[in-house]
Amino acid sequence: MRICIINTGGTISCTGQPLVPMPSDRFAAAVRDLLGPALAASLPGLRLHFDTGLRFSDQGPGTLDSTDLRPSDWCRMAARVLDLYDDHDAFVILHGTDTMDYSGAALPLLLNVFDDLGLARAALSKPVILTGAQLPLLRETPQGLVLNAGSDALANLSGALAMTRLRLPEVALYFDGRLWRGSRALKVSTRRLAGFASPHLPSLAEAGIGIWHGAAAPLPGPASPAQALDDPAARALVRAQLEAVAQGIDRQRVVQIPAVPADHRSAAPLLAQMIEGALASGATGLVLEGFGEGNIPAGDGAMRQALLHAQAQGVTTLIASRAIGGTVGAFHYAAGAWIVDTGAIAAGDMTPVAALAKLMILQAAAAHHGWDRSTLAALLTRSLVGESALQDRMTGPLWPGQALSAADGALRLWNDPDDGPVLRDGGQVLWQGAGPGRLQMLDGRLVLIAHDGARLWTSPPAVAGAVPVLTAHPPVLRLIDPSGRVAPVTALPG
Ligand code: ASP
């Protein structure tokens, strides 16, 4: 396997006091000299190439503390992967830990292209693994650079390289023995070597004595060779999107505002004022971090006014949770339910980090793709690259107790454990299934299967590999074929 190592900077490649990342070529030469033989011996079959061609600006050493990375730098990293795609089987990106989770959320959205239903038109087909360290890999001494013996950097670098062997076709983040989906990870510690966690998704893989797959299912990768980035036509789609995003993303001013305990009923409700202040200073999007399930003090109506004001100005608001592991959307409490009709969009189980990166990138890509506001809102809700729990489509059986929710409206398919599947549009029941069981795709048909294996209902045939997707406009469960075409609308069971 040919592995390309791209260095963006961060602690792993830092020296000095205070720490500053060294230029890529110096770091690459030192790693080759000091560690080349050891890496080659412990990773047989991997051919390593150190790329030193990434630049974040026309000047400087080409590496940065990740604190200083701009959103357009996410595009530069993605463009470098595209440039080198044909020559390598996997990419390991060395990155500072401070904003590695932002890059982990941004890169998959930049290396895949979707249609309005969130189905892939072009898809990443090779591993792209971000890693870094809490302590530098190398140490400067009077005799020159030496290995920093107490650092986690060598274990993270060699672990990330080993993980490429699993050939998972997604952007992942490797740290302290765990491979996380990049868009699900969060930096959780500046002291522990386990610097990242993934509150909503277990690991994709783990390393110890060897490496093994984790509990999270990897992304499926391209459905056909024509969609894979190996195909120049698919790559051209990604490149065109990337150029459009790179042009506009630094003009995106997405502001993240946490709910805070305060006297929000006073004459000057603090949170509402913060939102108005953000709007006045040109915010193009808002990510609010509510308490718990996204609850936000209503402030005697001032917050509602502020959110309606944002909506009227065309500024999209995402409501995420400050709780690590919080999920927003059910709004079980009156303290949050008032938000539902303000036009603000619930972020589901997306981390605030992923919500911010997604809002920026989708808004920067909207004109290029011709997405209007409602398409944008639906795409923000849909899981595009596994950044949130799948809600509007089935990739496995829909078991009793599970539900699908359309991203573009109130349509919901709930698999009632007692009565079986029921399709509701708001309060109106559109269809009630033929009894309890699991809904599952079998041989290109959607089938309702009872506990004893009896088929209670079978849909007309669809294209093999079709995925059921629930859409509110029109209100149907559609079967979409793997190349992204909408297969004939399937009549729901009756
Ligand atoms: N400030 C550093 C960075 O994010 C921290 C690290 O890499 O651990 O670049």
Image (cartoon, rainbow, N blue to C red):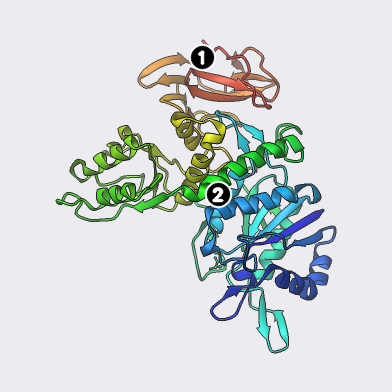
Residue wearing tag 2: 105
**Quarter of the rendering containing residue 222:** top right
Farthest front residue in view: 58
Residue 202 in sight? no
Residue 223, x across and y down, in percent: 70, 32
Q: Amino acid at mark 1?
A: Ala
Name the spot of residue 286 as percent of width and height, x first. Answer: 38, 46
Left/right of residue 277 with respect to residue 163 in the rendered view: left
Q: Residue at left 53%, top 69%?
A: 192
**Looking at the picture, does residue 493 appear above or below residue 106?**
above
Checking the image for residue 78, the label placed there is none
| Of the image marks 2 and 1, the number of the one nearer the N terminus | 2
The structure residue drawn at horizontal position 35% and vertical position 45%, both measured from the top left corner, is 294
Does residue 481 lie above or below 142 as drawn?
A: above
Compare residues 74 and 320 and report the one nearer the observer.
74
Q: How far across and how far down the image is residue 262, in percent? A: 22, 56
Task: Say few, some or many: other residues with alpha carbon within 10 Å of mark 1 (under 14 / 14 to 19 / 20 or more).
Answer: some
Numbered label tally = 2
Give the residue furthest to the bottom. Answer: 142
Which of the two discs, 2 and 1, sits closer to the camera? 2
Residue extending farthest left? 267
Q: Is mark 2 within 8 Å of ligand 1?
A: no
Taking the image as drawn, is residue 266 in sight? yes
Which residue carries the number 1 mark? 434
